[in-house]
Amino acid sequence: MDLTYAAGPTQRTAVVKSDQGSLDTLPLFTDGDTVAGTVHISPAPGKRVDHLGVKIEVLGQIELYFDRGNAYDFVSLVREVMTPGELVSPTSVPFEFKDVQLPHETYQGINVRLRYAVRVTMQRSYGNTVAQEFRFLVRNAGIPPQLDGPGIKMEVGIEDCLHIEFEYAKAKYHLKDVVVGKIFFLLVRIKIKHMEVEIRRRESTGSGPNTYNESETIAKYEVMDGAPVRGESIPVRLFLSPYDLTPTYKNVSDRFSVKYYLNLVLVDEEDRRYFKQQEITLYRHEL
């Protein structure tokens, strides 16, 4: 089996990392798009294939890795495209699903994945089923959140040893934005070796006693190398576009959430680490 989408060479695509770590180029859709194309079915030369019908499905699924085998379908559309019969030569079958609701973005996480696929299923006369899936991606540009509120401004201190103040211009960023801020050293009585800002992603899956939280560091950005002095001000300018980020996801189909944090880390000469983190909101403002 093979599949070509109706848009042909003009079909939008995007590159994502597969389960095995390779980079795959897949068709890209957004909420409300029409998913249409042609499925090509070719029996082996000289062979006749009896079948009980062919159906095509558009699927959107959430799979929790600790509950494999129980995928949750939040999109499930089916079309019967061939009635029972036999195939003696290659056959091309068109299909169309108009204005499909694709509410959630494709996501590949530590404990969960959200995936979309076009599945073609042929029920054979002998009881065995032939099925093949063709994955596609969904990304949705959201409405930018209100940015009228204040930025982030916090103080961090270790009594009589260290007192710093850091501020970021805002707490909400689009995926190609730049984090701009400053770090002020008000009191320094420990020997700081270096300082960095991390972007950390926290993934929450499940609910109640079966809630799993996993955190991973997406990016590290060194903002200072060497010992600061009292009164010193260190600028922060962190570009988000080079990193593998997603929007913030809140309670997707009651299955998972994804949050992001800016984590300020200081390391002293004895390799002790001091850190303070602050949640930020990420959103996609264009595809």
Image (tube, rainbow, N blue to C red):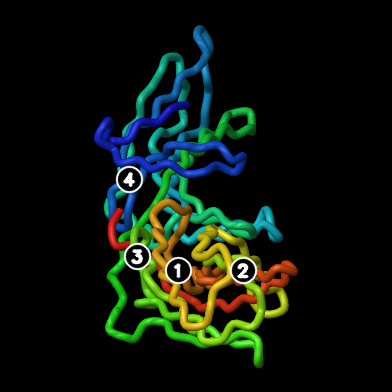
CB-based contact (under 8 Å), mark 3 and mark 2: no
Q: Residues within 10 Å of mark 4 (few under 14, many from 20)?
A: some
> Could you say which disc has been placed on residue 35 in the image?
4
Mark 4 vs mark 3: give the one in front: 3
Q: The residue under label 2 is which amino acid type? A: Thr
> Could you say which disc has been placed on residue 174 in the image?
3
CB-based contact (under 8 Å), mark 4 and mark 1: no
- Along the line of sight, which residue is nearer the eye, 219 or 38? 219
> Could you say which disc has been placed on residue 248 in the image?
1
Q: Position of residue 278 (x, y in %)?
A: 51, 78
**What residue does disc 2 label?**
205
Whether 273 is drawn above or below 225: the answer is: below
Whether 244 is drawn above or below 165: the answer is: above
Among numbered discs 3 and 2, the one appearing first in the sequence: 3
Mark 4 vs mark 1: give the one in front: 1
Mark pair 4, 3: CA separation: 27 Å
Which residue: 42% across, 80% down? 167
Mark 3 vs mark 2: give the one in front: 3
Q: The residue under label 1 is which amino acid type? A: Thr
